[in-house]
Amino acid sequence: MIILVKKNAEKRQVDNLLAWLKAHKIDPHVSVGAQETLIGCVGDVSHLDIDLVSALDVVESVQRIQDPFKAANRKFHPEDTIVDCSGPTIGGGHFLVIAGPCSVESEEQVIGIAKAVKAAGATLLRGGAFKPRTSPYSFQGLGAEGLKMLIAAKRETGLPIVTELMNSAHLDLFNDVDVIQIGARNMQNFDLLKEVGHHTRKPILLKRGLSGTLQELLMSAEYIMASGNPNVMLCERGIRTFETATRNTIDLTVVPILHRLTHLPVVVDPSHATGVAKLVHPVAAAATAIGADALIIEVHNDPPHAKCDGAQSQTPEMFAETMELVRKLRPLAIR
């Protein structure tokens, strides 16, 4: 349910309405826009008398929402959400690029890559410390030691860091992490989503699952937001289909579709979508042109010898060329 507040409503009236909703076990989400104030009602609204709510002096109109996602719904929050990533911002016209190695291999490696991507124009540093791998025999990351190396790169370059959380028991290790990534394999790990919603207000980069629909992605975002953390970014990284020419199949129409459905920023990952370093450049360009709010790109100083996903990792030189094209396309981006 969405309540449109009258333009001349007094603060006291709005506060009374919010208290009344909470007394009925409704969680009200207030969105103050340039032209109007909306209250999105999250919870079981079936017991509320819509005619009674409409008759309140402070209420202009009431609308029931059929979509299962509420807090993530643009109808609840017409203005774009702008997420602060420890300085750099995303959403509402703010664009950023996240870049770095798939996995942290050494302090020298991650600091060197951090300096290179920053020089090319990246605004955040990505790097995996805890790595979910299909095979139990593959490199699983350096864990807590890898986090320390990422933090050292942050100190050296000033770039905020993005890294994946796989287990809520590790949350205390992430105090100095700026953006927490929830990977594709954990998109529907609802216990983990509730934990990052309840225990932190850090921005969450939520990746679409390998076979996840957009509604399922939005419902996963809803778990985080309903648990108390509004700072969610949605990441399209391709889905599994019958096609084998690329690692996954990316459908860039999800960018304008998600912008219509939700106020949350939309990130595109051309590295995991294609699995081929040479394809990252054109897909990053296409994602920029179609209106993505951010890109996340894997960069490695020596891809043939990378311990993880070397085939899809750009060299620093390739990344610099991609950034040059992205800068040219940004003024033409569709929104």
Image (tube, helix red, strand yellow):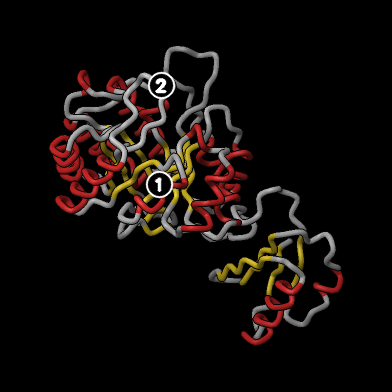
State the residue at coordinates (32%, 59%).
Answer: 86
Give the CA distance from mark 2 to mark 1. 20 Å
The local crowd at label 1, few if under 14, some if 14 to 19, many if 20 or more residues have their Cα within 10 Å, is few
Contact between labelled residues 1 and 2, with CB atoms less than 8 Å apart: no
Res 142 → quadrant:
top left
State the residue at coordinates (31%, 32%).
Answer: 141
Vertical placement of 194 versus 245: above or below? below
Nearest the eye: 80 or 158: 158
Nearest the eye: 307 or 34: 307
Res 322 → quadrant:
top left
Residue designated by label 2 = 136
Give residue 175's position: percent from left, percent from top.
34, 56
Residue designated by label 1 = 170
Mark 2 or mark 1, earlier in chain? 2
Could you say whether the residue bearing mark 2 is in a helix, strand or loop?
Answer: loop
Could you say whether the residue bearing mark 1 is in a helix, strand or loop?
Answer: helix
In the displayed structure, does residue 14 sit left or right of residue 323? right
Quadrant of image for the N terminus: bottom right
In the displayed structure, does residue 102 sit left or right of residue 112? right
Nearest the eye: 41 or 56: 41
Give residue 153's position: percent from left, percent from top.
19, 46
Amino acid type of the residue tagged 1 in the rendering: His
State the residue at coordinates (20%, 35%).
Answer: 320
Quick one: which residue is furthest to the front in this view? 169
Give residue 335's position: percent from left, percent from top.
47, 47
State the residue at coordinates (59%, 53%).
Answer: 72
Amino acid type of the residue tagged 2 in the rendering: Pro
